[in-house]
Image: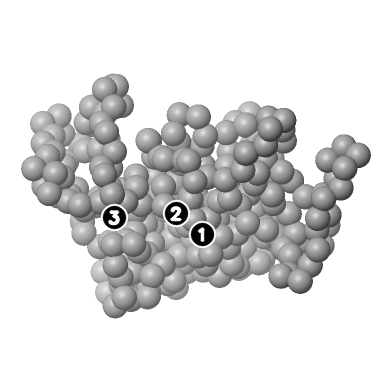
Amino acid sequence: LDDDELYERNSNVNYGAPNYAQAGAQSALNQPYSNPSSQNINPYTQNQQYNTQLLQQQQSIYGKKRKKRQMPGRISQSGMVVDPLLLDNITRHIQEGYTGANGFRAEHAFIVTWYRMAHGGAARALDVSQFEYIKDWQNTFQLVLASDEIRTFAIFNYARLNWTSSNEAGGLDGFGGRQAAMVGFNGGNGTGWYGLPYSGEGRLWKLGYFSNVLTPGRWIHRVDELIIPAGCTNASNGGMLTAPPWGPMHGGMAINVSGPCLRPADIVKVNFENWQTT
């Protein structure tokens, strides 16, 4: 995960994400979150041109291409890229990692990548020759917000975590100190805090090795109404969480159940009012 060869190094692409596939075994199913035709787009100029002919020639691995919706969001504006293949890639990761998301298709995505971020108080590189050396105390991670205008998912991708604190917080070379780095969600006004595992702890680097889906370093949560994590947790406390919390009386609705991780031989009993089912 900390191999720079797994990253999009094209200078014209500044929103590429880690590719967690094995080097040398990359395929269309394991491409990073990057725009393959971004060389034809300059998001910082007014005269953007999108190579529609190239887009028509590209074949999506998901069958028929999505229909373009006639809405302002489809217009290529400064800082925006119209890329259905990128949205299909994000959609696939959410559907594979989140139970009950089979009907979800990402219509919009906002991607932020922090590439080789140093901690507060880290030594500065004063020479180009030190560029590779200083990466040993830098972090690389990414946030993806994807929505179909009804449901919204947040994806954290952690590729390189080499520090957990800053010198200003009393740390030494990125570790220790009074306060470790924190990661999570809140209501936007400082309330309703939901932290990821290891948040605020000196073990924050473990986010790059563990996951709540099948890909190490990737953490997926649904964040529209409630913050609902994908997968399960090894926490010794806490109960089961189901979403949605209700459904039609005739059934037929997929329910996402998150909570402690279960073994194949475990038996789970669920009570629906006065009825119990296994």
What whole-number distance in Å separates the C-alpha atoms at marks 3 and 1? 22 Å
What's the residue at 55%, 51% (across, down)? 98
The answer to whether marks 2 and 1 mark residues whose Cβ atoms lie closer than 8 Å is yes
Q: Earlier in the sequence, mark 2 or mark 1?
A: 2
Q: Is residue 274 left or right of residue 23?
A: right
Q: Is residue 59 above or below residue 224?
A: below
Say which of 161 and 156 sits in front.
Answer: 156
Q: Earlier in the sequence, mark 3 or mark 1?
A: 3
User: Which dot marks residue 93?
Assistant: 2
**Residue 135 visible at all:** no
Q: Is residue 64 left or right of residue 268?
A: left
Say which of 170 and 148 sits in front.
Answer: 148
Say which of 43 and 122 sits in front.
Answer: 43
Tell me which amino acid carries mark 2. Answer: His
Q: Is residue 145 above or below residue 39?
A: above
Q: Secondary structure at mark 3?
A: loop
What whole-number distance in Å separates the C-alpha atoms at marks 2 and 3? 13 Å
Residue 217 % position (x, y): 52, 64
Instruction: Between label 2 and label 1, give the one nearer the viewer.
Output: 2
Tell me which amino acid carries mark 3. Answer: Ile
User: On the image, which quarter does residue 50 sit in?
Assistant: top left
What's the residue at 49%, 46% (across, down)? 102
**Residue 250 visible at all:** yes
User: Which dot marks residue 218?
Assistant: 1
